[in-house]
C-alpha cells in the first residue's frame, strides 16, 4: 500500500500494477472516470472545448457558472460539450475529437464480431492440446472456424513440421472435419520467413493449405532495408496469405525489429494479402498506430490468439482491445467474415 485515506488509496498489486482507488459522489462519477483515466492530452482538448462553450470541465463535472450541468456518466460529459460518447480506447488526442464532431467516429470492433481464429498450435508442435480439443474449445467460445497453423521445420525447438508431417496433419484435419459440427478447421501453417525472404517449406506443400502465415522468427537484427525487403519478398510468394506478429516485439523482453511498416502495409495492399494482430499479451503486435495505417491503406487485419493451449483463446479479448485502440471496425478485420466470404478472400490472395 502506497497511501490511504477516506476517499483514496493507492496500492501495488503482486503483478506490479499500481491501482489508484478514488471514491467520488455519484453526480461526479462520469467526470471523475474521464479525468482519471485520461489520456491527459485528450482531457486537455476536452477542457479547451468546454471553455469555448463558456463551460468549465473538471473531475467533478461540467459546470455553467456554479451549476453542474453534467458529470454523472461519461456520456453526459461528452454531450455537454456537444460530442457523442468517445470510446475510452480512442482517447489519445489523435483526431478522435475532430472525428466525433464530424460524426465520423468508427463503430469499433467487438469480441462478438469475431467468427474465427486464424492462428493456433496443437500438440503436433509446441501446443498443449490436440486438434479435437482446440476445435471444441473454439466452438464453445462461439467461433465457427479455426485455422491450425503449426510451426515449420526450421523451428526445430518447437518440433516444427516438415512436408511429410504437414501432409499428415492435413489428412487428420480432413478426417476430423467430417465429424465436427458447428465448427470447421482450416488447414494452415506458420511458416518461417528465412533470411533471404524465401519460405521454410516448398510451394508444393503450401499449395494444399487454406492459408499460409509467414513469420519472422530469426535474424531480428537485420538492418531496416534488408528486413523490409525480406518481408516484401516473402509476401511475393504466391502462397503467402498473412504476416504474423508483424514487428516481432515481445513486450518487456524484445524490441521490435527495424522495418519500414508503411512499405510492408502498402506491399500487402498491392499483393492483396493481410496482416495479423497477434493477441498474445506478450506481443499485441500490430501496434495501434500500425492498425490505423493498415485501415487507411485498406489492408485487412486478422485478430489471432496464437493459442498454444485451449485456455489461450481468452487472449482474443486483448487483441480486440488493441484493435479498438487502432480504430478498427468489424469491416476492417478479416476474421469477422463468415466462412464462405473468408474462403473467397483467402482464395483471391493465391496467384
Ligand atoms: Zn510466431
Ligand atoms: Zn504461432
Image (spheres, rainbow, N blue to C red):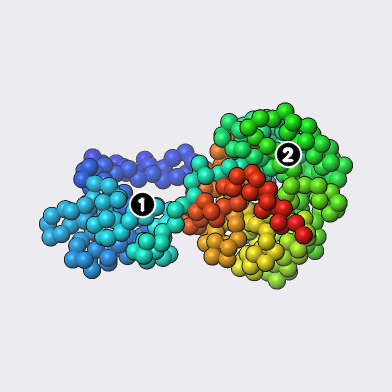
The quarter in which the N terminus is drawn is top left
Mark 2 residue CB less than 8 A from any atom of ligand 2? no
Q: What element carries label 2?
A: loop
Q: Residues within 10 Å of mark 1 (few under 14, many from 20)?
A: few
For label 2, the residue is 126
Give the image location of residue 65, x and y in percent: 12, 60
Could one spot residue 248 in this view of the protein? Answer: no
Q: Who comes first in sequence, dot 2 or dot 1?
A: 1
The percent position of residue 288, horizontal first and vertical second, equals 52, 58
**How many numbered circles are shown?**
2
Q: Residue 54, image x and y in percent?
A: 18, 66
- Gap in Å between the C-alphas at discs 2 and 1? 39 Å
Q: In front: 26, or 349?
A: 349
Cβ of disc 1 within 8 Å of ligand 2? no
- Can you name the residue that lies furthest to the top here? 179
Q: Residue at 82% of width from left, 42% of height from top?
A: 166
Classify mark 2: residues with Cα within 10 Å, few (<14), some (14-19) or many (20+): some
Seen in the picture, residue 172 relative to 84 is either above or below; the reply is above
Residue 231 image-quadrant placement? bottom right
Which residue is denoted by mark 1 in the rendering? 37
Q: Is residue 310 above or below residue 82?
A: above
The image position of residue 41, as x and y in percent, is: 36, 63
Determine which quarter of the picture holds residue 163. Answer: top right
Please tell me whether mark 1 sits on a helix, a strand or a loop: helix
Query: Does residue 295 appear to the left or right of 48 in the view shown?
Result: right
* Residue 132 visible, this orientation: yes
Amino acid at each position: 500500500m502506497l497511501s490511504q485515506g477516506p476517499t483514496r488509496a493507492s496500492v501495488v498489486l503482486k503483478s506490479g500494477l499500481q491501482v489508484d482507488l478514488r471514491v467520488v459522489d455519484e453526480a461526479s462519477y462520469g467526470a471523475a472516470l474521464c479525468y482519471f483515466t485520461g489520456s491527459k492530452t485528450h482531457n486537455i482538448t476536452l477542457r479547451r472545448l468546454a471553455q469555448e462553450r463558456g463551460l468549465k470541465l473538471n473531475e467533478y463535472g461540467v459546470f455553467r457558472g456554479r451549476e453542474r450541468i453534467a458529470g454523472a456518466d461519461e456520456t453526459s460529459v461528452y454531450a455537454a460539450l456537444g460530442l457523442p460518447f468517445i470510446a475510452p480506447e480512442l482517447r489519445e488526442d489523435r483526431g478522435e475529437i475532430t472525428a466525433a464532431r464530424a460524426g465520423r467516429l468508427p463503430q469499433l470492433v467487438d469480441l462478438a464480431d469475431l467468427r474465427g481464429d486464424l492462428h493456433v498450435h496443437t500438440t503436433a508442435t509446441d501446443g498443449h492440446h490436440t486438434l479435437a480439443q482446440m476445435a471444441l474449445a473454439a466452438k464453445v467460445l462461439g467461433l465457427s472456424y479455426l485455422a491450425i497453423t503449426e510451426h515449420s521445420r526450421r523451428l526445430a525447438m518447437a518440433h516444427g513440421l516438415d512436408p511429410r508431417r504437414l501432409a499428415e496433419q492435413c489428412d487428420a484435419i480432413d478426417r476430423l472435419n467430417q465429424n465436427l459440427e458447428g465448427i470447421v478447421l482450416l488447414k494452415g501453417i506458420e511458416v518461417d520467413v528465412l533470411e533471404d525472404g524465401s519460405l521454410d517449406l516448398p510451394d508444393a506443400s503450401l499449395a494444399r493449405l487454406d492459408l499460409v502465415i509467414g513469420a519472422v522468427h530469426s535474424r531480428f537484427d537485420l538492418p531496416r532495408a534488408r528486413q523490409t525487403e525480406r518481408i516484401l519478398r516473402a509476401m511475393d510468394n504466391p502462397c503467402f496469405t498473412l504476416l504474423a506478429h508483424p514487428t516481432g516485439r515481445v513486450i518487456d523482453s524484445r524490441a521490435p525489429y527495424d522495418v519500414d511498416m508503411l512499405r510492408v502495409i502498402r506491399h500487402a495492399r498491392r499483393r492483396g494479402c493481410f496482416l495479423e494482430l497477434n493477441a498474445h499479451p506478450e506481443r499485441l503486435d500490430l501496434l495501434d498506430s500500425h492498425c490505423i495505417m493498415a485501415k487507411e491503406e485498406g489492408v485487412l487485419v486478422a485478430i489471432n490468439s496464437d493459442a498454444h493451449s485451449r485456455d489461450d483463446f481468452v487472449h482474443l479479448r486483448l487483441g480486440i482491445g488493441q484493435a479498438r485502440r487502432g480504430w478498427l471496425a468489424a469491416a476492417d478485420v478479416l476474421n469477422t467474415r463468415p466462412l464462405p466470404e473468408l474462403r473467397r478472400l483467402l482464395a483471391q490472395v493465391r496467384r
